[in-house]
Amino acid sequence: MSFSLDIASAQTLKSEAKVLRETRAAAGETLTHGAALEAVARSHGFRDWNTARAALPDRVAVPFQVGGRVKGTYLDVPFRGMLIGVQLLSDMAHYKVTVNFDEPVNVTPTFMFATLRHRVMATVDIHGISSALRGNGSPQMVLRRE
């Protein structure tokens, strides 16, 4: 039973224990807070709550959140926009982000015609830099919080 889509923290495990206690109470079963913490820790692969607490940080700093205002460059074109999707990837070091631009971005390198993008998806690291590179060696996307 995991409600967090990102890296586990002591706070997320405590929240899960609280929900477990409430669920059991609604079913007419009593469960102490300590027993709930132990059960949740085991469900995450830890031997007990003390082991989980020692191994996990209090909270996890998330570099990007849905609804957050961002700015940066996409294909070397400056933009401002809003994050409408953030997904932590399985390597736990990269995020798939979906950015909705305030103003459409022209992704065509020539001025003979324009191809405008209102929304793009990209994979960025914790610093907001795409590992995918353009032909000139610059990252496809550089993302910063506003």
Image (tube, rainbow, N blue to C red):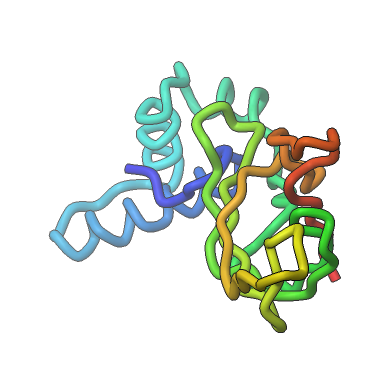
Residue 129: image location, x then y, percent = 78, 43
Residue 59: image location, x then y, percent = 69, 47
Q: Quadrant of residue 25?
A: bottom left
Q: Quadrant of residue 36?
A: top left
- In the image, 39 versus 133, the foreground residue is 133
Q: Look at 42% across and 29% down and name the residue there.
A: 44
Q: Quadrant of residue 118?
A: bottom right
- In the image, 95 versus 61, the foreground residue is 95
Residue 5: image location, x then y, percent = 48, 47
Most distant residue in the top direction: 47
For the image, the number of numbered tags is 0
Residue 77: image location, x then y, percent = 82, 63
Image position of 67 (left or right of 109): left
- In the image, 76 versus 88, the foreground residue is 76
Q: Look at 66% across and 72% down and name the residue there.
A: 113
Q: Is residue 27 above or below residue 146?
A: above
Most distant residue in the bottom direction: 103
Q: Quadrant of the N terminus?
A: top left
